[in-house]
Amino acid sequence: MPKPAITNPDFFGFYELLGESERAELADIREYLEREVKPLTNHAWDTSEFPFEVVEKFAKLRLAGYQFTEYGDGRQRSPLFTGFLSLELNRIDPSMAVFSGVHTGLAMGSIYHGGDQQQRDRWIPDMVEMERIGAFALTEPDGGSDVAGGMRTTARKEGDEWVLNGAKRWIGNGTFADLIVVWAKDEADGNVKGFVVEKGTPGFTTSKIEGKIALRAVQNADIALTDVRVPEANRLQQVNSFRDTAKVLAMTRGGVAWQALGVAVRAYELAREYAVHREQFGKPIGGFQMIQDLLVKMLGNITAMFGVVVRLNQLVAQGSGSAEQAALAKAFTTTKMREVVSWARELFGGNGIVLDHEVAKFFADAEAVYSFEGSREMNTLIVGKSITGLSAFA
């Protein structure tokens, strides 16, 4: 009797490194996401609209509380669990994963690590319940990779208020978020500081970025700040320079590596399933050598990606994970993801360019994952400096 086909893209069994209770919880989450969220995703991507009903569905899972134990259900999950959770979200739909990641990782992470206890108690409970949605406004129309030294958005202290002026671009959740963490340069000392701007504040306006080819359901916004007045109580009290901003980015950069893995895993799953059912010349195309070569190359990339992200999360759990290691993980996994989705789309032939077969969405979304949270080139320079001791930044 021939052995049954191995359908699991986790070919080396990294999933088994999780404890039994965490594996069971992830299995429940996957089933819920498949049932409640996935049916909404292709239409949302096609129409470039955000399906707001997913907010309530995510709230029921309490996804926003996993990383902030004292505000969540009190249960401590391992860093490896949060990585696999990101994988599960992204294999369902990268746009929905970005919505969740911006809210929990970037916005809540900034408040949790950059705010004082009073500020954490003020905002995070509502954000855990997803009663207030967060956004993170760092990138600017004329500043991406160089925003650390070239930030144009300014903050000026006037009494017990701050006056913000400037513009931000590519802000996920920006069109509808209730709390937007805005990064601005203090005119007095030149240091970058963080401010929580609440929805409806006078002078704060948003407009949706149209015409995207990737992450189409994510509501990216252009934001204009014109004499926006923010009380001192809304300035993140533990943020004193861009180094504090960079700490948040270093934490979320490892999450993007898991995101790349989730995108690659789903593209591979779709391709393998298609290969064993699509028939040409009288047999499934999976029985042809060139198709098997594509599948094995995809699986090889995915296996290497698993090794990188799992080890990174183990180092984080030990308290020894570094920003340079996160940068290498992001640069490597997103590059390998790009290869996987390209091979998967190729395997589908003409069917690979229509949304019906879903691989087209992952092929397109991979381009955004490849670019954000630090481009491959910028992450390469971070790692390059660490291994040579020489800075090659312009």
Image (tube, rainbow, N blue to C red):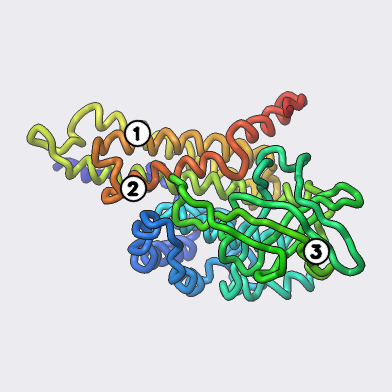
Q: Earlier in the sequence, mark 2 or mark 1?
A: 2
Q: Nearer the viewer, mark 2 or mark 1?
A: 1
From where the camera sits, is residue 191 visible?
A: yes
Using residue 185 as the reference point, say whether residue 72 is left or right of it. left
Q: Residues within 10 Å of mark 1 (few under 14, many from 20)?
A: many
Q: Secondary structure at mark 1?
A: helix
Q: Quadrant of residue 196?
A: bottom right
Can you identify the residue that label 1 sits on? 343
Depth check: give the residue in front, 292 or 55.
55
Label 2 amino acid?
Asn
Decide if residue 4 is on the left or right side of residue 30: left
Q: Which mark is residue 8?
A: 2
Which callout, 1 or 3, points at the residue further toward the start of the chain? 3
Mark count: 3
Please give the name of the residue rendered at 72% of the width and 31% of the height, measured from the top-left corner.
386
Name the residue beneath numbered marker 3. 235
Point 57% across, 36% down: residue: 331
Asked where in the image residue 364 lies, by quadrant, the reply is top left
